[in-house]
Image (cartoon, rainbow, N blue to C red):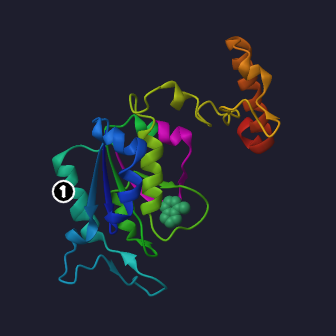
Amino acid sequence: MRIDIITIFPEMFDGAFNHSIVKRAQQKGHVEIHLHQLRDYSTNKHNNIDDAPFAGGAGMVMMIEPVALCIEKLKSEREYDEVIYTSPDGVLLNQKVANNISMLKNIIILCGHYKGIDERIREHYITSEISIGNYVLSGGELAAAVITDAVIRLIPGVLNDETSALSDSFQDDLVSPPVYTRPAEFNGWKVPDILLSGNEKLINQWKHEQSVLRTRERRPEMLGE
Ligand code: ADE
């Protein structure tokens, strides 16, 4: 998979993409991430990429030319399955959305900023808009990093043990069961006996029950309750 991210703050991705699973996925060739500085596509000598809104109003608006130039250049080099715009009024990111994106070959993510982007960008270039939650971030970079992380771990082969993505919370519309590690007892606090029993069938049954219980307690809406 190839992910092209258009941003005015490429440095913001250093931490998110150069560690752990996302880093390894790139090293192993499962994903290529390319960051594009939007200012490089500015059409004026001050490298501006925003301007005041027509008819007034607060805040600046991302201009159409730099975004169009950047997207057109990328599209002239390969075909893209989706051009995603990060926006608080987009479709809420969830595991299903991440699963769907993980099956694509090439995507562009445009990080939003200021009061918004010229509507013509949305109309003519953007194929889907994604929000990572009902709150407003200072910019789309953190959202793009979250989307990228959630997607990359789902690409087959990225996780060492593929079942570990399958047992993620939400993967089967349930949250994960509790997990424990050594010691089996600490301060008198014991690990549930069943997990030490070695009986795989009963253990799996217990895990499923715990998942359902937890989902009912914490996220009843996921069970349609
Ligand atoms: N940009 C600002 N807030 C955002 C959000 N919640 N999700 C995606 N992009 C955003």
Magenta span: chief secondary structure:
strand
Neighbourhood count class around disc 1 (C-alpha, 10 Å): few under 14, some 14–19, many 20 upward: few
- Residue 123 falls left or right of residue 57: left
Nearest the viewer among 171 and 195 is 195
Q: Is residue 17 magenta?
A: no
- Residue 204 falls left or right of residue 19: right
Q: Is residue 144 above or below residue 208?
A: below
Q: Does the magenta stretch include residue 93?
A: yes
Tell me which segment is drawn in magenta.
82-99
Nearest the viewer among 104 and 193 is 193
Residue 15 found in image quarter: bottom left
Residue at 65%, 34% in the rendered image: 173
Q: Mark 1 points at which residue?
A: 73
Asked if residue 203 shows in the view, the reply is yes
**Which quarter of the rendering shows the C terminus?**
top right
Asked if residue 88 shows in the view, the reply is no
Residue at 77%, 25% in the rendered image: 209
The spot of residue 74 in percent (x, y) is 21, 53
Amino acid type of disc 1?
A: Lys
Q: What element carries label 1?
A: helix
**Which quarter of the rendering shows the N terminus?**
top left
Q: In the displayed image of the protein, which residue is found farthest to the bottom? A: 56
The spot of residue 62 in percent (x, y) is 36, 73
Residue at 43%, 32% in the rendered image: 159
The spot of residue 192 in percent (x, y) is 78, 27
Q: In the displayed image of the protein, which residue is found farthest to the right? A: 188
